[in-house]
Image (tube, rainbow, N blue to C red):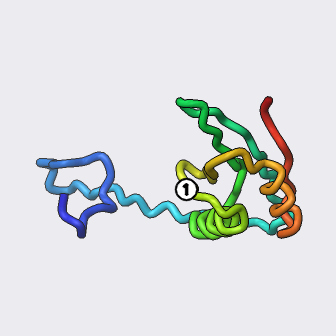
Amino acid sequence: MSKKNKARVNIVYSTNPNFKFEENNSEEPETPSKQQQQLKVYLDRLGGGKMLSRVTGFLGKTGDLELLGKLIKKKCGVGGTVKDREILIQGDHREKIILLLAKEGYKAKKAGG
């Protein structure tokens, strides 16, 4: 696929001379204030007994989510990623993440088992 046509959705070729491509121009919603965010922090176990802290529930722009993920990784001193609208942090850092989010003004709580 050519780079200039990445916005086209679901069509490869059409013989209809009046056909117009669908454009994927969905704009992201504005990020609500920190006090309106309802974040949940989970602990997951991966294969080999590894732990993963997962933050979900962020509403707003992807760029703001990535900035929050970068802040959490930096303050915890560990690796992680932002994937599928979730922040994934290596290790069990739930308490530290909840304290950090509260300090930053977010509403966050533990979730799961």
Q: Position of residue 72 (x, y in %)?
A: 69, 63
Q: How many marks?
A: 1
Nearer-the-camera pick, 104 or 62: 104
Residue at 82%, 63% in the rendered image: 100
**Residue 85 relative to residue 8: left or right:** right
Residue at 66%, 68% in the rendered image: 74
**With respect to residue 100, does 56 lie above or below?**
above
Q: Position of residue 59 (x, y in %)?
A: 70, 57
Res 99 → quadrant: bottom right
Per the image, the residue denoted by label 1 is: 81
Q: Position of residue 28 (x, y in %)?
A: 57, 64
Q: Quadrant of the C terminus?
A: top right
Q: Residue furthest left?
A: 15
**Residue 44 visible at all:** yes
Amino acid type, residue under disc 1 in the picture = Thr
**With respect to residue 27, does 92 lie above or below?**
above
